[in-house]
Amino acid sequence: MKLLIKNVAISCDEGKTKEHQNIEIINNKITGFPTNPVESIYDKVIFGKNCLALPGLVNTHTHVAMTLFRSYADDMELMDWLQNKIWPAEEHLDDDIVYWGSMLAFAEMIRGGTTSFCDMYMYMNACAKAALSCGIRGNIARGLAGISPNGKQALQENIELFKTWNGAGDGRIQVMLGPHAPYTCPPSYLKKVREIGEKYDIPVHIHLAETKTEVNNCIKEYGITPIQLMKDIGLFDIPTLAAHCVHITEQDIRIMAEKKVCIAHNPGSNLKLASGIAPVLAIRKAGITLGLGTDGASSNNKLDMFSEMRLAALIHKATSYLPKAVTAKEALNMATYEGAKCLGYSNLGKLKEGWLADIILVDRSGFHWKPNFNDISIAVYAANSQDVDTVIINGQPLMVHKEMLTIDVERLNYEVNRVVKKLYAFNR
Amino acid sequence: MKLLIKNVAISCDEGKTKEHQNIEIINNKITGFPTNPVESIYDKVIFGKNCLALPGLVNTHTHVAMTLFRSYADDMELMDWLQNKIWPAEEHLDDDIVYWGSMLAFAEMIRGGTTSFCDMYMYMNACAKAALSCGIRGNIARGLAGISPNGKQALQENIELFKTWNGAGDGRIQVMLGPHAPYTCPPSYLKKVREIGEKYDIPVHIHLAETKTEVNNCIKEYGITPIQLMKDIGLFDIPTLAAHCVHITEQDIRIMAEKKVCIAHNPGSNLKLASGIAPVLAIRKAGITLGLGTDGASSNNKLDMFSEMRLAALIHKATSYLPKAVTAKEALNMATYEGAKCLGYSNLGKLKEGWLADIILVDRSGFHWKPNFNDISIAVYAANSQDVDTVIINGQPLMVHKEMLTIDVERLNYEVNRVVKKLYAFNR
């Protein structure tokens, strides 16, 4: 398909915005920025009047189907929340429930300008099918708990997931290995994960150093931090995306930099679950690739990358007393180019010729965009996920002028109501 | 006017939501919740289908017309920002510019469910006129800098402001005294402010303990903290709303509790300007009335109370490691009932019979509202200022189903463009 976005503003690397630009997309790539395009040669022309084009936002850590637990249990202690609310409810999941829970999450993501996600959960065939159906880009992993009776089976499922779905949807779907965390996956199990990763060339997505308790328990049991334990096990010898990394030492940061581990920073979830605030300045200083994530909607409670960008730009200023700690531009970069790197892409996350065409158009007509001296400042500090007007993923328009093109919203609402009743039947 | 809101959800004090309720408003008060209302006896019926009714949000600290400095200067050191960007630009303000800057702010506030504001700035007659014209509720104060050559004149202007506008718009406009801060108002000047406050019975709105530097300088100069200095001067003998209070001691908190000083907590601005994080848990434990504010759009960069509620509920969890530090319900309470108390109201900020009719209807049809087990959780953690469907202030509908009824949006856009050009002419 030959697609043209006509008359749109583009923010340049120098931070200035060029108005009245055009973007040409052929198949799944950005092929140029023609100055006088002839509309008739394109299959579709999308008018970008008053919109700012940005690279699609990349959500580097989430549990897609947990959207069905949104608002089910908030303002609770972590273990109370998990043991008494989330885990019992998760027992009742199935393919049907996860499919529609995933579709709800994708609808929310697309609506809010998120074009890629990185998921770790269960019933992942259903998640893959929903992603393929709606056209979103995503990395999926089977969540693996080595201490669980089904640990071995889950690892086998993760291999099958890789064989079945890796590269599907014109490369939109990539499969990772999903060992949950050091406290649920003992070293012997993680070594098996590493072997599988090496054998099949599959990268890893894991939770690391999310809470103080986790780190303290790890030190008590193994004498070293979770990061050091992962290094010793050899997990970092395969490409690894580590979510959270809230409680990490300088030595941990040096290890991750050396091993080229990527980090998914989840400010909203880390705040809400009272986990703490990740040492983002030190992480960035070490040159570690740092993306942003929402975590699941049950601990956020939304899948809104505009909110995460704002939090990432704001909270580290206050904790460091440095007003330039994370600038608006850096936060946007985390949510786009660096996030895409976390997912293993080297040609995604910038509006550049030859790069993958994941593009969002953000409507600048709201009162909160006025006056506008700096589009990136407003996009990060003032804009709203609901400003997103149009979403293109892999060259395919999924939402145009707020109309969803690949998700039947009425059916989605019906099916979500249905699976929510089914999921929570145990609770009545 | 007799107004009926029909078929709306109302959140009760116990946290449960009652669906299919009706709210009756006569003139400016909530007069009841009729179960079988006869539509024909009302002048206007607003249908609340799928909406949640909440008390209007109260923005307890802002500088309304500074909306015109939005995105003009971000990610800068505070003094560089003030001295080289904001203060030089403020030299070029006039009544015309402040009127339309204020109207832009009010449009953004109403659009996002804010029904009351508390402002301290200059050209306040223009601000009052704009507020009266659009129907918003607000407390206004002339910003007073005792060290400025016009300090004496400004205080006179503040008295005139009180005489002219206090109680205007059926009581919607209240006037406060606006001494800027201890570092711009020496003790002799603040004593004059206190005398005026006592003489005319005018409460005070002041910035206190916003930055470490301010507190350190105060201790260096006076040997005591800004809070202790204000107590010694006697400022707290008149009702005082103190904005920020980021760097305060236990003794400061005891003083403010004893003197019934109210605090406006501005999480977004305090984070963005790298001021720090206010000790909200200790403030609340002391029983101090605590509202939320956005501060000016130049240091936020928006006037979005949904964002401030979310920040208030999130950041204190992480700094205290307590997941219940500030619950969703407490954050909503700060943004409504406690905020209204900060502004001097005792019959505003709850949906109660006999109370003032400032009501917003929040549309729950977005994907981020699904599933919904707890309206308050979603309102605080997931909702969005753009979910606001309808806004009623003092019994008057200002926005119904997203249509602005008292602000001509096309003219507003035209006038804002005009005054922005005029304001920044010096910069070309």
Image: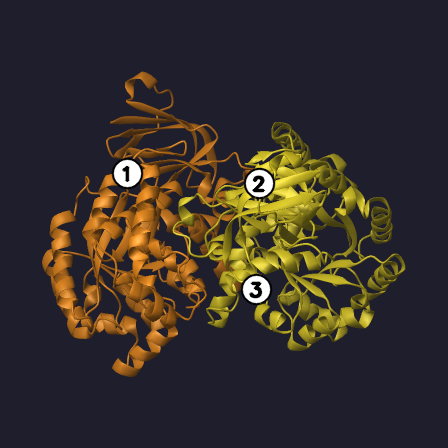
Chain colours: A yellow, B orange
Q: Which residue is mark 2?
A: A390
Q: Is residue A219 visible?
A: no
Q: Which quadrant would the C terminus of chain A be assigned to in this image?
A: top right
- Which numbered mark, 3 or 2, is in the foreground of this view? 2
Q: Quadrant of residue A102?
A: top right
Q: Which residue is mark 1?
A: B355
Q: Which residue is mark 3?
A: A276
Q: Which mark is residue B202?
A: none
Label 1 neighbourhood size at 10 Å, few (<14), some (14-19), many (20+)? some
Q: Which quadrant would the N terminus of chain A be assigned to in this image?
A: top right
Same-subunit check for callouts 1 and 2: no
Asked whether, in this view, residue B419 is left or right of residue B304, the answer is left
Secondary structure beneath dot 1 equals: loop
* Amino acid type assigned to the residue bearing label 3 in the image: Gly
Q: Quadrant of residue A221?
A: bottom right
* Amino acid type assigned to the residue bearing label 2 in the image: Thr
Secondary structure beneath dot 2 equals: strand
Q: Position of residue B110 (x, y in %)?
A: 35, 42
Report the Cα–Cα distance between label 1 and label 2: 43 Å
Q: Are marks 3 and 1 in contact (CB under 8 Å)?
A: no
- Which numbered mark, 1 or 2, is in the foreground of this view? 2
Q: Is residue A84 visible?
A: yes
Same-subunit check for callouts 3 and 1: no
> Of B263 and A134, which appears nearest the observer?
A134
